[in-house]
Image: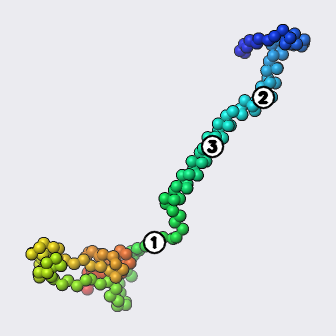
Amino acid sequence: MSKITFRADDDLVEEIEAFDASKSEVLREALRSYIEDHEPADSGTSPDSDSLDALVADRVDELIDRRLDERLGQQSTPQDVTVNVSIEDERAQSERKTESSGDVTIEPDDRTCTQCGEGVGDEHVYCPNCGEKASKRSFCECGDELRSDWAFCPGCGRRTPAADVLDPR
């Protein structure tokens, strides 16, 4: 046990000596009852600081949520999703039963330079006069640009003229 020293006036010492127990026992009991009675008051200082911290944290969270909503916006409209499925099966290898409706169009090659108007031969990739690229880009009806080695349009899935090389003849 630890030792605690009390200083008291003469009247308090006379009252303590009036008890049947020793002064140490009387003071221990008095101190215990005092602490038990006043325990909530001692711990009452920390909840004030905790509640202030909690109040600040709640306010900061609220402001952050508001700013995120302003910047990102509420996206309540559903977004379009494009799914491409490729099937490797004997049925996928079979010939098409219906005629192609010609959905995919390729711009005609006029073989004149768009920059200077000079005629460009089939063997030229660039205009021999000004250096402009002679090959034309192809586009699908949906507006997406097609590369010459693509069999299907990545935007809408339509078959391209390049897909004809996949057909066994």
Residue 14, percent from left and from top: 87, 10
Tell me if label 2 and label 1 are in contact, CB under 8 Å.
no
Counting residues from the start of the chain, the first of labels 2 and 3 encountered is: 2
Residue 122 visible here: no
* Res 83 quadrant in image: bottom left
Check disc 2 and give the amino acid type.
His
Badge 2 element: helix
On-image quarter of the C terminus: bottom left
- Residue 138 visible in the current orientation: yes
Mark 1 — residue?
81
Q: Is residue 132 above or below residue 61?
A: below
Seen in the image, is 131 located left or right of residue 87? left
Residue 54 shows which numbered tag?
Answer: 3
Q: Nearer the viewer, residue 160 or 125?
A: 125
Please rate how many residues cluster around mark 2, counting C-alpha atoms within 10 Å: few if below 14, some from 14 to 19, many from 20: few
- What is the C-alpha distance between the residues marked 3 and 1? 42 Å
